[in-house]
Image (cartoon, helix red, strand yellow):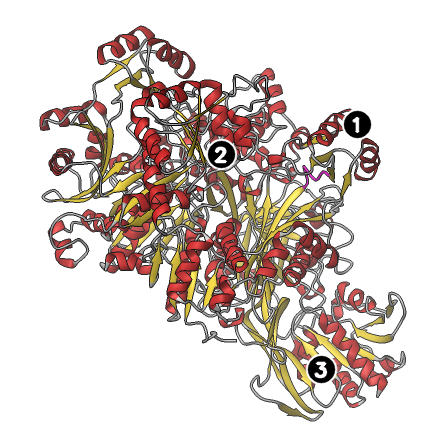
Amino acid sequence: MASAYLVLDDGRIFEGSSWAATGKTFGEAVFQTGMTGYQETLTDPSYHKQVVVMTAPHIGNTGVNDFDNESSKIWVAGFVVRNPSSLTSNWRAQNDLEEELIAQGVVGIQGVDTRAITRHLRDRGAMRVGIFSGLELTREEMVVEVRKAEAMSGAFLVKDVSTPATYVVPAIGQKKFTIAALDLGIKAATPRSLAERGVEVHVMPYNSTFEQIMSIHPDGVFLSNGPGDPSTMTDVIEVVRELLLAEVPIFGICFGHQILGRALGFETYKLQFGHRGINQPVMDKNTGKVEITAHNHGFAVKAPTDTEFSTVYGRGEVTHTCLNDGVVEGLALLDKPAFSVQYHPEAAAGPHDASYLFDRFVDLMSKKVGA
Amino acid sequence: MPLDTSIKSVLVIGSGPIVIGQACEFDYSGTQACRVLRAEGIRVILVNSNPATIMTDPEFADATYIEPITPEIIERIIAHEKPDAVLATLGGQTALNAAIGLYQRGTLAKYGVRLIGADVDAINRGENRELFRAIVEKVGGESAKSRICHTMEEILEAVDELNYPVVVRPSFTMGGLGSGIAFDEAELRQIAGAGLRHSPTSEVLLEESIIGWKEYELEVMRDNKDNVVIVCSIENLDPMGVHTGDSITVAPAMTLTDVEYQKLRDLSMDIIREVGVDTGGCNIQFAVNPKNGRIIVIEMNPRVSRSSALASKATGFPIAKIATKLAIGYTLDEIQNDITQVTPASFEPTLDYVVVKLPRFAFEKFADADPRLTTTMKSVGEAMAIGRSFSEALMKALRSLERKEAIFTWPVVSETERAALMQSMRVPTEYRLQQVQKAMWAGASIDEVFNATKIDPWYLRQIELINQQAAIIALPGELTAELLRTAKTQGFSDSQIAILRGVSEDEIRKARHHLGIRPVYKTVDTCAAEFEAFTPYHYSSFEEETEVRPRTTPAVIILGSGPNRIGQGIEFDYSCVHASFTLREAGYETIMINCNPETVSTDYDTSNRLYFEPLTLEDVLEVVHAEIQAGPVLGVITQLGGQTPLGLAAGLKANGVNILGTSPEAINLAEERGAFGNILAEQGLRAPQFGMASSQLEATNIAHEIGYPVLVRPSFVLGGRGMEIVYDDAALGGFITRATDITPDHPVLVDRFLDNAIEIDVDALFDGEELFLGGVMEHIEEAGIHSGDSACVLPSMTVTDEQRDEIRSATEKIARGVDVRGLINIQFAIADNVLYVLEANPRASRTVPFVSKASGVPLAKAAARISVGVSIKQLRSDGILPATGDGVARGVSVKEAVLPWNRFRRTDGRGVDAVLGPEMRSTGEVMGISPTFGESYAKSQIAAFGPLPKAGTVFISLADKDKATGIEPALGFSELGFHILATDGTAEFLRTKGIECTTVRKHSEGTGQMGEKTIVDIINAGEIDLVINTPVGRGTRADGWAIRTAAVQKSIPCITTTAGFSAAVDAIRFLQASPLSINSLQEWLA
């Protein structure tokens, strides 16, 4: 097996072996702590331009299948694993993971001390990284190349992942509502979750205008997850502000939550190493209950967590916080129909504890319609 | 919600003696519960009959009752202590049953005591099959499909729906009689036909078979705000059909996608809510069809279980501790995660390593037991290992078992052998995985093995990779750094590599160290390194970065005792834990190495550092090396964990490791028969005559010289056969042919057997100058019954003052002669007023906790202090030992052994013989303490076997050799008003002594012409309250065996020695006269 190297921005290099596609790749190094769900992670557009280090030591055991994809392709920029599986065992499996990665040209590395990498990223923060697989480069050359790569702060990536044209996911059963879902990197599980609740979802390009959105007469607007730095999303933020003024019910998740936050006038900031996993405890401050949730975010909204706040759209509050580190995980306006969470109620991968949020969105639209 | 301040005192119910299926994991959980409650300022009242537990140490509760765990006794404790609440979810099924008993008696209502953790309704919903089935259905889950049938037509109709194979369970038959699996119609007609006949209601239950399905368990926790988390998923490598306690299990689940895992998670959460376990942990088991993912919910335990202990050790999430906090009002988000110190317990641990648990069996102790693994648990212990890959964890776990046969080998396997392996692996037995590995080594494909075993192909692939690596290692050529590193990463031990390369283990180790290939130590941190870990709970791996932190305080490394097995269990963990506690108090850092997930020693806050590692020379040397790199290491304590660490002492010393306490040379002196004989001779002490025979003829000659009876045992054990007492040439010859492979290289030891001697057990401390005698225990059963299986009493009852002085003096001479520094255990026998030394073990013994509890002297703590150089004189002035004199027992304490007869069946489905002998077979022990022998013995019997009859019918059958000693107790029973039954010989004998009795037919005589029942029929009819049956040699052949097994099946007390017979008279006499007294240990020791 050929050698492969994982080279970090700060000069630390881990030697492993080639796996998946060979060659080189660059991105932001992040670690993902889920023990299941690598296929969902790989196909989650939010991981665009990120090299994902899996902390679970065995990856690929259950292969890949057509049912668990969260989008049409693998988005991660590189994939770092301790022990890839050389045998696929699952009744739903259709292909071997490594073959799939090779087919999609995703460079990987195996046999590295993933725990050491994770500890490094935890202590030093997410940083640029390169994987060099089967190449003859000196250590210095590799570090120089990594440092030339694009950083995540200030990155505008939505254009790469968003749908070029609107498509419709029909409601399952009787249709109750129509919504516009702004695709900033949406996962397949989201329209599915909404459709199950009788919602027809029009998945629209990220750069849809207020008028284009309103032209479908939406009962609500959904702001999806997605990659990149929320501070680059000025146009979308403007559209959201118009929607707020129009009092269209809004539900944002992840990147969409950060955009709503910014639209309300809050700042976003980059976390040291982010939250990426499916075991994150979030407290719903109104019920006092804890939900175990799926997270994938490197940025967060800065908002006061102990009191109500006021915005140009009226009063609001932080509804959810992460119990691990106090990060703002949910926002809601009290006078306007808009709320958002930093995490993933659609799960995939991850627990279903937060699926009630889709019901909450449906309720919000019902009230609006009722009113 | 914060602490419920209305709870000021809690009664914690323990799990009683260690039995198969309920082991020291409940000491771990109970100890955690006690610590949590006391830390909250809550008064803790504890009841547990097991003296070997840490939790029953007087320092863990305010009032510790070492009493039988029966509703009657607990009611008296409640009446006396008036606790606000009872916590019964941490003491296994025993505690749960006791709680239900308290509820049914109305005790809880009468005294206004709350049951916290789970209420009676929730317990019922979780445990009652029908209620649980309904709940599963309600939440949208599936249970195995079944149909009740009364005729063959109905049966054939039902099977159309259920398909083959199908499980047949006749209704209302004893012990599963007549049940089986049918694979086709012919078999179904046969099994179900018999089932219809066997069933008194002509009813059989047909159930769809889920044998061979994948098996999973989820550990779930819920708090009073309805927050629910899954602590761990566990996958069984052995598919459905093998009890999870007997299965190889892996955490986390390895072969599920997220979609499939989340289905199990959702079901688990719905079930715990619907069952209504308000606070605490439970365990839910699932079967998953590997062909289509169909999920069947199997069962739940509405309490902390064996799997919870495993999950706690596997994740670092202390389930019992948190369950206790939840029970007293806290919610998950209010509890801190000890390991990260910044995050709350309301999360789900994520693992960046793989955990493998292997069961340890004791079939060699039960030669006639059916070795097949089924849904009845048979293993007696377990080992767990952690690695950064499955193969690394598996290989470590295999060597943690301390079974030569468990470790993978790569011999030449013939075509015939391979075919035989393919056949034998179809039926799960102890070494199935080894059969799989060997067959695959011989070329069997993953498909072939999967078809034979239904083990998931992913695991088989890992075995294949291990085999491939073995083939590479075995190739001629240089052992390169890369090759060695790869091998180590896959978990190969130095010894395995050495065998493959045809060199010594030491050479491989030297080469490896020369190449700088050593393990690093990673940390179990609940969060895959997302947050910093503050608890040094480590495991080894061959990777880049180690997480062992530097130290400045001198450290003492304590070696634990590995997996529980018969003869080495919780008692040794007790000593190790005590050593850790006392040395921490003395200002040392303590470092524990052990691989048993059930224990208190492997709790991450018992020692300053914990290494979850196999107890082999290689693994221990590497930890020692890593710790020496980290800071000063005083040395290693090997004398507290039983034979396992003791066996490593010499190797450690040879590698330059300082052994604290008794030196390896001294250990050898005591263990080597010749050298020990010399010490005895020098000191003028006597041992029973013995000889070593290298042929049949020689053995007979020695036996003649010594005189029968003799105790014989092979020096090389074949097929697990142990020792036997033989009374004549024929029996001796038979034993040698049957059980030994006698040659000059494999001699047989022949000892004089002291018939009807009193056996004495002594635990003492020696510091080189002074002897402290912890206790002189007298065995109730005569010499010849293994000391571990014999009941014993402290203080000794029949030993005279002169004999006691003689014993003390002999103990001191031996301790001095061997040069002990710490604990020594010596077994003596007194026959015809002569004191014989049977054996000496310069280490902590099984009886250390019992003696400590009976006398209030912490022997293990003292031993640990002595091993770091503190004198007994100093310990006396420090208050650890009494200021003057030896240990004095308070009251009379009786220890009784608990035997697992009811767990084993022969292949023909009948019970194994319930007879005591020179080979130890007990799994655990109980203690009874009171002012008199009769009462203490009664308590011990109630705690171990259930109530003793106060009146009724006793059956007595005495072997000729026991007739003289049996007459007095027989008379005793007669005087106590019991109706006595006996078979011919015994009846006649009793009548000559004037004891009235009724003659009954022997089993072998069959039913009489007038329909007179045999004794076995009478036992089965439930007409006997107590059975006395003393065997001759190995089994009074069929008759005695049939009587004893019938008694065991019917749960009727069965006594097999005349000494036990006499003690029972004392006990029943007490029970007839007065109620049992109850006193806490604290009161006894005050």
Instruction: Name the mark on residue B185.
Output: 1
B345 relative to A256 in the view: left or right? left
**Could you tell me residue A176's position as x and y percent?**
87, 74
Chain assignment, label 2? B
> Mark 1 or 3, which is nearer the eye?
1
Q: Which-is-in-front pick, marks 1 and 2?
A: 2
Task: Say what secondary structure mark 2 lies in.
Answer: loop
Report which residue position mark 3 lands on.
Answer: A234
Res. A157 visible in picture: yes
The residue that label 2 is drawn on is B1024
- CA neighbours of label 2 inside 10 A, class few (<14), some (14 to 19), many (20+): many
Q: Is mark 3 on a helix, strand or loop?
A: helix
Q: Which chain carries label 1?
A: B
> Tag 3: Cα neighbours inside 10 Å, few (<14), some, or many (≥20)?
few
How many marks on residues?
3
Please give the range of residues in magenta: B208-213
In depth, the one of B1062 and B40 nearer the eye is: B1062
Where does residue B995 sit, x and y in percent of width and height? Answer: 36, 27
> Given contact means CB atoms under 8 Å apart, are the residues at marks 3 and 2 in contact?
no
Q: Position of residue A98 (x, y in %)?
A: 67, 46
- Quadrant for residue B991, please give it: top left
Rendered residue at 63%/78% (across/down): A287
Mark 3, chain letter? A
